Amino acid sequence: MRAIVTKNLILNNPLMRRYRCSLLRFSQLWIYLTIFIAVIVLLLYMNYSFYQTKSDTIEIEKFCKNVYYQLLVIQIVVLWIWATINSRSAIKNEVFNKTYDFFRLLPLSALQKTAGILLGRNLLPILFAAINFILLLTFGSLGKVSSFLQIQVILLLLSTALFTNSVALLLSNTATVKKQAKTSIFVWILLLFLGAPILLPSIFFSHRAIWHVHKIENYLVEFYNINIPVLLLITSVLLYLSIWNVIGLVRKFTLETEPLFSRIGALLYLLGYEFIAIGIVLPHLRESIVYLYLFWLASLIPVVFIPLGSIKSFDHYLECCGLRRAGFHIGKSMTSALFLNSNLTLAVGLFFIWGIISAFLAMISKAEPSLYFFYLVIIFSFYLFLLLLLEIYVVYSPIYNKISILLIFLTILYLILPLLLSFTLRIPSLRFYSPFGFFVHIINPFARRDFNIYTSVLIVNLLLCVIPAFLISKRYFHILALRSKM
Amino acid sequence: MKILEASNIRKEFGTLVAVNDVSLSLEKGQVMGLIGPNGAGKTTLLRILGTLLRPTSGAAKLFDYDLTTQYLDIRKHIGFLPDFFNLYSDLTLKECLEFFARAYKVQPELIAKRVDEVIEYVELQDKRNSLIRHLSRGMVQRMGVGVLLVHEPELFLLDEPASGLDPKARIQLRKVLKKLSSEGKTVIISSHILTEMSGFCSHIAIMNNGKIELSGAVDEIEQKIMGSRMVDISVLSDCERAVSLINQFPDTRIITVQDNTITIEITKELEKLADLNAYLVKECIKVVTISERKTNLEDLFMKISAGEK
């Protein structure tokens, strides 16, 4: 099974061959090889010179350990930066070079396309990373870096590389890329001249910063009462996120115009994320209420970002109502189709799940139930207003193509203005009207809990929601009317 | 054998209806010219059939596969050439064709042979090891057709294949397209330049404002909308008198008079033409030739768009 997967995804993947032909052509490969070898030789020479001037005899172990950590920095640059830039530009290049239609039509599986780009487009970084891994293992062993740490570091390097590259490819995987901002060669030359004197010494001295990495080897964290080395936990979390990225890529390469997350995908992603977040905070929940707030903050991130990844456009709305009208879903009205497909329904559903989990953890942490219930309702009101702004963008952007600018302005105003007013008018309670100010308030254990202010924040938020809700409903009715006429 | 059966295909972009309930069918071996002015919806329709766009509503079957649900299967059987395309400029012609052959799962042992055949077909033998970035636009366009040929698709969808080419490149491409037509390949080709399509389309579909105004075999359509025939009459002398005589002849209309050639429109019945000839001879007009002018796509299109049905 594994052999078949390896064969289809890597060895027999036509995209791998396509990139191999263009990227590993000797006429350009020798240039990269020369630079890479020069950097390694320079690094070794600088280290050698550094130790020789300090004493007559070179301590091999220290020398090798030092080189090991510097090679680690190079590996990070190669796998996390160079490869990520390559992945980011893969689809953009296809669109810009007008080959994207051919690429889309290739009868390859979405997984083959994903693997083909992530590996094929990065053949050069992978080649150099492979050479560097050999050097790393050699210098690590000579420098007596523990094998367990080396394994953890390698896993972390690879999982982070997979994560950053898959995110980059996801960000580039859009059919709406219209132009490519090409950096002028002169800018690159300038960057090289300015950057080289900074970059080389930075790599050389970077060991000072990461010299302490070895201490992390034995640092354990509790995850659902199981002690796990911190690097392994980070690796696992990154792998979890990367798997979702790859699922997103497969979805994008298969369904193309559909949003990143399906409805079920969005829910599963959130549940998985919450599982990890709970696992990390649960052992500490009774220690301090701060862990509950940390959980709230961390676990709210996907609740905010998943709706963005699942966003359905105005065209999708028209389409889903049209399918109902055409009798593909007999028995269900266009209104229910619109409701089920609405971005608002999903986002509110996600918040509801988050709310239940948060309330459950609040109970475990023995927090005051009425207070935390109030907090949840107020957070929901903030969320709802921001959500309505997003939906206004969805339904009004076909008419006003610059509406996003106005909405971004309003969002910034909503987030910042209460803080500014609180500062300039010296009315501290005004800051609660900003989500930021409110979060800072609930995290602060010494803050005075004032239910009157909370109520007024809630009322203001609900009042603010009225106009956007009215505008959105108007547009929803317009969609239904339009679809009935079509 | 039916290759394509589409009914009520519709594509909306917001409030714009780009393709408006189009129904179309195509048999194996037919070459259909999709003609219409810019913005008629040709590209959108082709992109829908090429599985690059999902229709808002409607249904279509290509090779018995459903267009909206089995589009991955359809992609194996079609060759789609977009209107503005390029090929992988960092590959040589040979590498590029090998890449597409592998992607379309051509038997590994056949790839080399197929690549050679295709390069020969598009007459780019001397460029086989050149990088694509070193080819002219016309060559890239021909290579585009070559890329489609490499996996021998059952249906070719060509969107304005000659746009932006110089006359020489246009002639060379036309040669390749004619070859496709003569070999019995099934093709849908769109263009707003009608002369490009003349001579090798067996069928046409005329699009306007997202709708197919008329479609069918070229002969049938010609029959349907050209109720009369165009005839060139060359006379040795006395052209002016010949013109006045023709003007008096019933069911005849003079279109142009150039040198000693009079182009007329006359009803379809051959008898009428014979009568006119006899009449002119009787009136001592020295008729040199009478020849029927072949109706071309341009005439048809102009007739339809002018609403002269």
Image: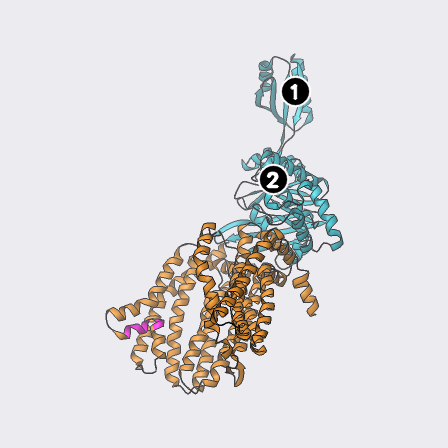
Chain colours: A orange, B cyan
Give the residues in magenta: A429-436
Q: Amino acid at mark 1?
A: Leu
Does the CB distance between marks 1 and 2 fall below 8 Å? no
Can residue A433 be found in the magenta stretch? yes
Residue A417 coordinates in the image, percent (x, y): 30, 67
Q: Amino acid at mark 2?
A: Gly
Within 10 Å of disc 1 (Cα), the crowding (few <14, some 14-19, many 20+) is: some
User: Can residue B59 be seen in the rendering of this structure?
Assistant: no
Residue A114 coordinates in the image, percent (x, y): 60, 62
Task: Identify the secondary structure beneath mark 2.
Answer: helix
Residue B272 coordinates in the image, percent (x, y): 66, 24
User: Which dot marks residue A420?
Assistant: none
The residue lying at 70 percent from left, 70 percent from top is: A1
Q: Which residue is mark 1?
A: B276
Task: Identify the secondary structure beneath mark 1.
Answer: helix
Q: Nearer the viewer, residue B178 or B97?
A: B97
